[in-house]
Image: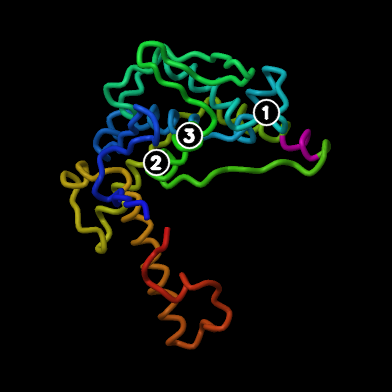
Amino acid sequence: MENRKSLLKLSSIEVPGTKISVRIPTVGEILDNEASYYNIVSSLTASPFQYMVQLDDMHIDYTTITDYDLFKILFCAYAKSDLSILFGDLDVSDFYVQKGENGDEFLYSPANNIEINEKVYHDLVNIIRKINLIEKADYKPGNESAKKYLLEKERKKQKRNSKKQYEPYLEKLVVALVNTGEFPYDYDSCMDLSIYRFNRSFKQIQHKISFDKTMTGVYAGTVDVSKLRGRDALSWIANK
């Protein structure tokens, strides 16, 4: 049986079979440039559905391009910027798309002699998603009419939001949790928490508050236990 260390104890995670390690940044590190961090993370873990407008502008059908093909496009674009918050001292700026003998494309770094093939890609993005508690957005429309409707809807949404300033997500979450009785950290000590520890604490507190309210309803007779779905509803411990 594989011996997996708890992410609660780690500051980085190695991508199996590579020289790539993904850092687990602290809350304080992310707050130094929150918008940039979440932009990078959301882009590297994105599905084509989330980039339908940009892909359409490139004359690429978002329903036919694979997650990995999108990653190759986005990684090469972001690799030229500072990705040290995710990859530490590893210089990823020279990655480019190379074609193998069998015709398959992959990302390759000559300086580091690192190859990111499709398997490595899946391992890498799964690690990033797990660190940040991100669910994979995987959706495809049922027909051409639905595809066109969703594309037009998303294009209008992005146009409306283009002039809006970034609204801090993590900063608001820190303020909310520090002022919650269940959270045992103040502003200063919270800064040293890894983002994984912080996110798991948030999910647990959120679940515990919901559980307490549910049980209050059960005892008061206003909640029917038989209608509660799943084991999570009857346990104060969050599974995710």
**Of discs 2 and 3, which sits in the foreground?**
3
Write down the quadrant of residue 52 in the picture: top right
236 vs 173, nearest the viewer: 236
Relative vertical location of residue 204 with respect to residue 48 in this rendering, above or below: below
What is the x, y in percent for residue 75?
48, 22
Q: Which residues are magenta?
A: 146-150
Relative vertical location of residue 178 with respect to residue 160 in this rendering, above or below: below
- The residue beneath circle 1 is 65
Relative vertical location of residue 78 with respect to residue 21 in this rendering, above or below: above
Q: Is residue 157 left or right of 191 when viewed as pictured? A: right
Asked which secondary structure carries label 3, the reply is helix
Q: Earlier in the sequence, mark 1 or mark 3?
A: 3
Q: Residue at x 27, y 40 (%)?
A: 27
- The residue beneath circle 3 is 42
**Of discs 1 and 3, which sits in the foreground?**
1
Q: Amino acid at mark 1?
A: Ile
Q: Amino acid at mark 2?
A: Tyr
Asked whether the residues under the numbered discs 2 and 3 touch, taking CB atoms below 8 Å apart as contact, a structural biologist would say no
Q: Is residue 120 magenta-colored? A: no
Q: Earlier in the sequence, mark 2 or mark 1?
A: 1
What is the x, y in percent for residue 116?
47, 25
What is the x, y in percent for residue 132?
39, 43
Q: Residue at x 46, y 17 (%)?
A: 108
Instruction: Kindly identify which numbered label has been placed on residue 169.
Output: 2
Q: Residue at x 54, y 14 (%)?
A: 98
Instruction: Kindly identify which numbered label has been placed on residue 73.
Output: none
Q: Amino acid at mark 3?
A: Ser
Asked whether the residues under the numbered discs 2 and 1 touch, taking CB atoms below 8 Å apart as contact, a structural biologist would say no
Task: Name the image quarter holding the N terminus.
Answer: bottom left
Q: Earlier in the sequence, mark 2 or mark 3?
A: 3
Query: What colouring method underlies this structural image?
Result: rainbow
Res 87 visible: yes
